[in-house]
Image: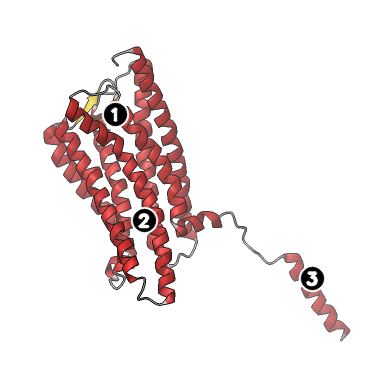
Amino acid sequence: MNSGQTKINGFILSLVSLGCNTFACLISCIVFLIILYHLYYNHVKRKDKITIVLCGHIYLESLIYSSMLISISVRSILGDLYNQSFDSSWCIFSGYLAMILLGMLYFNFLNQAFYRLIRIAYFQNKRLQSVKLYVILPFIEIIILTCILLCILIPLNGVTYLPNDHFCYPSFTNIPSILSVAVVVYIGPFCCISFIYIHITRFINRQGNIQTLIVKQRQSRDLLITRRILTIVSLLLILGIPAMTLIFMFIITGEANPLILRIAFLPVSASQTGLSVALLFCIPQLKNIVLNLRKPRTLMPTNQTMLGTVQVKTIVGTQ
């Protein structure tokens, strides 16, 4: 670090990020386990199964990505306290992995938006409403995303060890690398998500006057859910705005703050926390699963059953 105050500020930023990521990791782990339990032990309606599977993908991705951010924050804190170096092949690999995981987080929300588009606007197409499709889709996407990022960043020497931050990541001074990552991981998926939800909203509004009452009620519910999900999309937007702002400030001024990456990671960590909580309230199927855990199962009381049997025998005996 350039000064003692900068080192203290960096330590505080990393500590706050660590707290946010730990909370997000804990919530994501709990909800993911609840989803697994529900899918395995309870009967799930076919129309709800894809939604639950997509939520499971999002929470699993959030769990893994939050764990990766925890590792980055811990390395920064240890480096600040003990001036420890983490420069290694594993560090370079973890830098690539962090970007791939962030990209997959956006792609999972894109898959959710795509399914809602098919279910609402193109419901006649049954092939695109298969559970198997949405189970294997993330695996296909992670292969494609990995190949794209590796093909772009390796020739540019994109991921390097940053001695001031004590972890590996694309340097903001490497403009081609950082812009390529921003387009592939953030700008492209976010624009697709926004376009899909705008199209869904316009479609529902156009169809509102020519449908039956039942269809109108269903579309009103879809529109309400869509508006709630736009809250999540807003969190996704917030997740990347500070980093993009710092990138353009560096391009214009040519001066980079020594804490530029830690400043960029803080809203990412905060958004991870917000996403893990907001998704519970925005998806009715997921909310019902969590709320149903609090409801006790209704069983026939044994004492009442035995009492009824005794009463029947008594009546028969008297007759």
Q: Quadrant of the N terminus?
A: top left
Q: Amino acid at mark 2?
A: Leu
Q: Tell us which disc is closer to us: 1 or 2.
A: 1
Q: Quadrant of the C terminus?
A: bottom right
Return the x and y of residue 229 as percentages of the image width and height. 38, 54
Left or right: where 174 falls relative to 124 = left
Label 3 residue SS: helix
Q: Given contact means CB atoms under 8 Å apart, are the residues at marks 1 and 3 in contact?
A: no
User: Which residue bears the numbered disc 3?
Assistant: 307
**Can you say whether 198 is above or below 189 in the image?**
below
Q: Amino acid at mark 1?
A: Leu
Picture disc at residue 261? 1
User: Which residue bears the numbered disc 2?
Assistant: 54
Left or right: where 5 falls relative to 164 = right
How crowded pointer 2 is (Cα within 10 Å; few <14, some 14-19, many 20+) is rated as many
In terms of depth relative to the viewer, which is nearer, 218 or 155? 218
Whole-angstrom CA distance, mark 1 to mark 3, is: 71 Å
**Can you say whether 69 is above or below 290 in the image?**
above
Quarter of the image for residue 103 reads top left
Whole-angstrom CA distance, mark 3 to mark 2, is: 48 Å
Q: Amino acid at mark 3?
A: Leu
Q: Residue furthest top?
A: 4
Whole-angstrom CA distance, mark 1 to mark 2, is: 30 Å
How crowded pointer 3 is (Cα within 10 Å; few <14, some 14-19, many 20+) is rated as few
Return the x and y of residue 138 as percentages of the image width and height. 29, 53
Mark earlier in primary sequence (1, 3)? 1
Label 2 residue SS: helix
Q: Residue furthest left?
A: 155
Label 1 residue SS: helix
Residue occupying the point 29% across, 20% down: 85
Mark earlier in primary sequence (1, 2)? 2
